[in-house]
Amino acid sequence: MNPAEDYIINQEEPFKSILLQLQVLVETSVPNLELKYKYRLPFYYLNGKPFCYFNASRKKGYVDVGFWSSAHLSVHLDKMITEGRKVMRSLRYYTLEDIDAEVFVAVIQDAEAVNHKGFWK
């Protein structure tokens, strides 16, 4: 197992279940992703470029899915968190039931379409 998978598997509940569900959704929605362990987080790369990351914040009680190309995203922006960040946007989940698979997959597919554009607009 690589360190990114260890990060996911070794989380306490409900974070572990949330992360596993998100992992399945990401990996079944976008082919050719590579899961790495960067910045002490599970980080997906697409065609050698950063794509999205998972961050389980036990202290704050949620899992964030941050999108590298978030400056270029155009779907479900009303559901994304920017809180204290200039460019980065994320989807945030407190429980497994918070995950709306349709919304998540739509954002993932939008991120895939704009990933080549990079971090800044």
Image: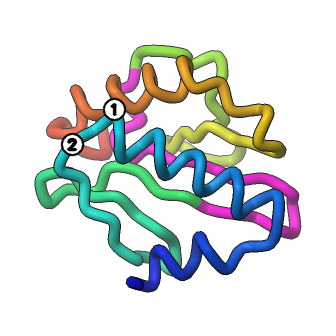
Screen quadrant of the N terminus: bottom left
Q: Quadrant of residue 106?
A: top left
Q: Position of residue 53 (x, y in %)?
A: 47, 57
Residue denoted by label 2? 31
Between residue 48 and residue 11, name the one nearer to us: 11
From what the image shows, is residue 26 above or below residue 75? below
Q: Residue at x 12, y 53 (%)?
A: 47
Q: Residue at x 59, y 70 (%)?
A: 8
Residue denoted by label 1? 111
Between residue 81 and residue 31, name the one nearer to us: 31
- The three-letter code of the residue at mark 1 reads Ala
Q: Quadrant of residue 76?
A: top right
**Number of the front mark, 2 or 1:** 2
Question: Between disc 2 and disc 1, whose residue precedes?
Answer: 2
Q: Is residue 88 magenta?
A: no
- Residue contact between numbered discs 2 and 1, judged by CB atoms under 8 Å: no
Q: Position of residue 5 (x, y in %)?
A: 48, 74
Q: Which residues are magenta?
A: 55-73
Q: Position of residue 36 (x, y in %)?
A: 34, 72
